[in-house]
Amino acid sequence: MKKRKITADDLLKIKFVESVAISPDETEIALTVKVVAEGKKKYHSHIYMIGADGGNLRQFTFGEVSDSHPVFSPDGEWIAFSSKRAEKKGLYLMPRRGGEARLLVEKDGSLSGLSFSPDSKKILCIFQKADEVPKTKDGKKEAPVYRHVTRLFYKMDNAGFQPKEEGQIWTFDLADGKGTQLTKGSRGKEAPIYSPDGKWIAYVTNIQKNQDVDSDLQDLFVIPAHGGKARRIPTPTGPVAKPQFSPDGKYLAYLGHANPNDSWGVTNYHVWKVPVRGGEAVDLTKKLDRMAWDMTISDTIEGHEGGLLHWSPDGKYLYFVVSDAGSTHLYRVTSSGSKVEPVVAGKLHIMGASVNGDVSKVALVVSHHTMPAEVHLFDLHARSKLQRLTNFNKKLADEIQLVKPEEVIVRGRDVYPVHGWIMKPPDFSANKKYPSILEIHGGPRVQYGNTFFHEFQFLAAQGYVVYFANIRGGQGYGEKHADTITNAWGTVDYDDCMAFADYMEQQPYIDKKRMGVTGGSYGGYMTNWIVAHTNRFKAAITQRSVVNIASMFGSSDIGFAIPKEIFGTPFSNPDGYRKISPITYVKNIRTPLLISHSEQDLRCPIEQAEQLFISLKMLGRTVEFIRFPEEPHGLSRCGRPDRRLARLEWFRKWFDRYLKGKR
């Protein structure tokens, strides 16, 4: 049977594998799968179980629920997970062998960072209490009379207004759900973890005078497991994440760096080790010029679980993930730092990983260009081939044509190598000339790569050559590559985009009169910048974009951090902000432009899009504005399913109108 072309609606048929956890005996794997609900207006997510040999796949939880982040108890008897069921959000417990899920903890707020005590009798987590919400006489929620704001970081995209109370460390007894709050104070705590003997808990917090301005200056602490006085473990000034005790309890490893003046994600996170009883922290991967974090982006998942960090049982190795030239790989480093080596590499995206017990196996969530995420297993002792365990999207894959893009290195205008990919239509003919679309990623410090991207496949199936690259300013190619655009947006990043467009123009199958460009967030900034500096593109779509950096400084949820990236503030460096903002050059824009923006975007607030739209309308330019109600910044990755479809259909229609002449 001949396969059909992928459609926008096929996004609704994808089963999104989002997290994975391997059991202590390494015989079973728990995973979460998210699916689109029947009404196309929400998602459900469930926990599945599968044997490490690939057998006995079974659904573990059911219903119109949102289950996430399962963790095994050390004795292997229990699985704990977060869930929202019948409007009740809380912490649930379920026997590993199956049975009814038991609501262990129901709290009005968020529970995160779940783990068990070594004796499997308690669950450790961070609980952040929600603010009290006024209610009408009939019990319906209503807005408060006012909101009193006292700090910079008072709102967050996809979350809304931040609760007044910071997250604190709690433990809950498995027997009766009784909770004990171990920490208090005005500073939030993160990433709690038990010591192997169960006597101590390590965690991360920020004790800076202005924790919002100095948000990356974090510290590592330990407290007695029953609560008590906290002790700071000295680490270099900088971020701290994912602390993990060594098997003997003498060391703590963590992910971070030692650059207190880092811009937006330029400095690589490395693996560090520090003695628990005092001593100097050591960077174990200082020679590895790569980020020890997953920075590869996809439109199938919002955000990243980020970093894996886990000791081998003998304390000789630490396992972690690395973003490298469009892929995310699994690495390990000796505890002395003498040797760093890849464990699972190749042209793939490791979106999640779990090790446990003897650490002879690692469970992985893996994706590549023609495969949405699936669960894989790798035998660390045998070092055999990566084994695929699940095939949730087989039915869909059997129906549709998926295109593997061509990988290229394009020499930039200053001979700089630009790494990119070209995705051709599934029925591509070398004898035809095609319209094309340049896609530009956000961030800026993330990377495109070897992962499944529905939007790219969809546009290619519509008859477009889609090309995308990791231009300077992103991650995956070293700190120098990432740092080139600090305080210099619209310079070499623009050159790299134009160099790729130059290269594509020279291809015999490209119609240079029918070239389009689009991007979101920082990619939207680059789209705005491009159409304000060249008329070579026939049509453009700017998504959730940056337009006026001076106004974004005051309106974005993290706008106060912009001076780390664009030096100074709008009042100390007004010329610098004006020079680097696309709105300054709005009179030059003559390319037909579709503006796509979400009304609840707190990262790049919709006032950015409004400024651009009104300016272009007043100038009499060809511009249209699509607004998505209720949606956050990440509409393309986590928005309501029907709105994600509407977004794709608008993009298709816009490019069809101006690149194909379809009305």
Image (cartoon, grey):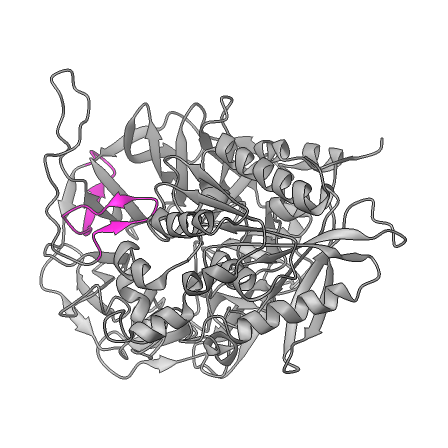
Q: Residue at x 53, y 55 (%)?
A: 297
Q: Is residue 85 left or right of residue 636?
A: left
Q: Residue at x 77, y 47 (%)?
A: 425
Q: Residue at x 51, y 75 (%)?
A: 491
Q: Give coordinates of residue 600: x percent, y percent.
A: 34, 42
Nearer-the-camera pick, 589 or 41: 589
Magenta portion: prevailing SS class? loop
Q: Residue at x 44, y 60 (%)?
A: 308
Quadrant of the image containing the N terminus: top right
Q: Give coordinates of residue 450: x percent, y percent.
A: 63, 58
Q: Is residue 457 left or right of residue 447?
A: right
Q: Give coordinates of residue 87: x percent, y percent.
A: 29, 26
Nearer-the-camera pick, 17 or 523: 523
Q: Is residue 356 left or right of residue 101?
A: right
Question: Which stretch did the figure color magenta?
Answer: 153-177
Res 262 visible: yes
Q: Is residue 301 magenta?
A: no
Quarter of the image for residue 300 reads top right
